[in-house]
Image (spheres, rainbow, N blue to C red):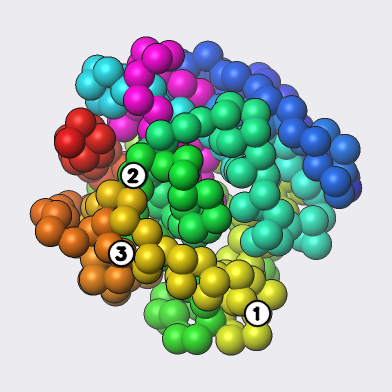
Amino acid sequence: MRLLRTPEDRFTDLPEFAYQPRYTELADPHGGLIRVGHVEAGPADGPPVLLLHGEPSWSFLYRKVLPVLADAGLRAIAPDLVGFGRSDKPGDLADHSYARHVGWMRAFAFEALDLREVTLLGQDWGGLIGLRLLAEHPRRFAGFVAANTGLPTGDTDLPEVWHSFRRVAASARVFDTGRFIQSGTRTKLPAEVTAAYDAPFPDETYKAGPRAMPGLVPIRPDDPASAANRAAWRKLTELDVPFLCAFSDSDPITGAMAPILRRSMPGAAGRSHPTITGAGHFLQEDAGEELAEHVARFVRR
């Protein structure tokens, strides 16, 4: 596997993101050692909350969430998915698969960090990966927060807006990360923020991850990940792990998943599930502090 590593000087002077990066090396059967970057906030002995981002963002997306969780006494951990942020970037599209991304985050969270009694907040691909981890390792979890995400199997179609993004991601001559983030938010992002989303990718050769991920979402019943996701659904609907849906009111991509998750997850029954108003797909940008408050209350309860 051909791995690329973003130079550290690309991450200087990031707005509101002065966290000291930490690095973990994972042994990967397909490519030797892969370095995963992450940041943490809050007491080291606090209840752990794992914050998983999605496509095409990185842990910078959680800069408004991290301090709120830390102030609540929680240990907030925000890794970069392999191919994103400060993590190593497999340089070929074929190096990315749904199963590999689940395996990389499994190794990071449960083998390297040995997290137990963890609450996972997953948005976009963070939930696609996180729900698989919950289904496959339920004893590691104290709770799960789904925020604008789901677990597709390819048995039902996805919205046309998502198919459009999938086509653009695969074919665009330049994959404009900052512009894609802006298109999924309701607020106007300052230039320094969109630049921060571009920072992990010095040029197009670093963007195999962002280009590959839309194509890994199951859209057919016989997709390579469909069987594993169906098995995960069967397990999830039997688990009584506390479950919270914290979706925004303005996400055309995943909005329809909120009622499905609320009625399907046993741990969601009897809970008050917030709808965060005035926020788009990347609700961490539009309402990060509000999202964090809901997570903190959920963990405390």
| Residue at image location 45% in from the left, 86% down from the top | 156
Q: Is residue 243 above or below residue 294?
A: below
Marks 1,3: beta carbons within 8 A:
no
Residue at position x 46%, y 44% in the image: 139
Residue 88 magenta-highlighted: no
Residue 13 place in picture, x, y as percent: 50, 18
* Label 1 SS: loop
Write down the region rendered in magenta. 39-66
Decide which of tag 1 and tag 3 comes sooner along the chain.
1
Which residue is under mark 2? 143
In primary-sequence order, the first of circles 1 and 2 is 2
SS for dot 2: strand
Number of dots carrying numbers:
3
| Residue type at numbered disc 2 | Gly
In this rendering, the answer to whether 66 lies above or below 132 is above
Residue type pointed to by label 1: Asp
> In the rendering, at what x and y percent does residue 296 appear?
23, 33
User: Of the residues shown, which amino acid type is indicated by label 3?
Assistant: Met
Q: Which residue is mark 3?
A: 265
